[in-house]
Amino acid sequence: MDHAIVHDPLVLVARRAAAAGAEVLAGRDEAQFNISDKSALGDWVTDFDRASEEAIRATITTSRPNDELTGEEYPSAKPLNPSGVRWSIDPLDGTINFVRNIAYYCSSVGACQLEEDGTETWVAAAIVAPALQVEYFAGKGLGAFKRDLRTDKLTQLTGPVDAPAKILGTGFGYDAQRRQFQARVLEEMLADYVNVRRIGSAALDLCLVAQGSLDAYAEYGTNEYDWAAGALIAEEAGCQVGRPATTPGWQYAGFVDPAKLTEPTN
């Protein structure tokens, strides 16, 4: 299948980088987790998170040494002569799933271009879920695709079909007050959906909307590295996408009414 996206240089780097991170995750060994908490109880980090990010960063810098790097586990790296491209890395999205041997975890890599007016445009994305044996990738204006790593079958993603029985994907943060706020908002939203799914990986939630398995996704308080790749994949699949306007804020995709995504009152 000859698509322009297959030859796009930034998409190629994103795909190689996400694959390098996922290769680390594929070596999952419970004896080597070395779990510790970061921001809160349950916000886990393992040796695999760090090793995966190291592999992703090394892959990017080998091809593009003048690009800026931001990630979940290590400080940002800005070269002396920046190219105007910045990468956002989530080496292991779904760490709790990974530790508990639930298949929904992945390595996620997104790239944005710094525009002349100071804004950033997301231009390339790749996500690899090794336990699911699937890769998702997208390029700005080039579409979004899913590749079955077992068969090498490539499928263009076109998002969910508008139908009455909609399924909403969501996630919850580690702070108890934030979870209670999210639950109140979701309770108000439930009239629009027949059921809810909580996958445990924001990046894969967005990919599931892109492939039409979920009709919508909304989550409050995600970080940029959580959605950097997945949001572009959903967007290029033709989905409505909203990136957080504030930090924290709402990330959403698919059949969502943004007016119902209220902010905390306290």
Image (cartoon, rainbow, N blue to C red):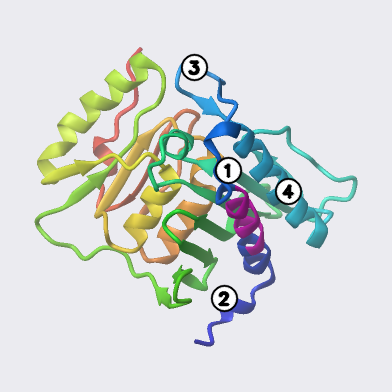
Residue at mark 4:
57
C-alpha distance separating marks 3 and 4:
26 Å
Picture residue at 45% right of the left edge, 22% below the top: 42
Mark nearer the N terminus (4 vs 1): 4
Q: Is residue 77 left or right of residue 1?
A: right
Q: Is residue 84 visible?
A: no
Whether residues under marks 4 and 1 lie with C-beta atoms below 8 angstroms apart, the answer is no
C-alpha distance separating marks 4 and 1:
11 Å
Judged from the image, the secondary structure of the residue bearing numbered disc 4 is helix
- Amino acid bearing label 1: Asp
Mark nearer the N terminus (3 vs 2): 2
Query: In front here: 249 or 25?
Result: 25
Residue at mark 3:
40
Q: Percent position (x, y) of residue 249?
A: 43, 32
Magenta residues span 16-24
Residue at mark 2:
5
Q: Percent position (x, y) of residue 263?
A: 34, 26
- Picture quarter with the C terminus: top left
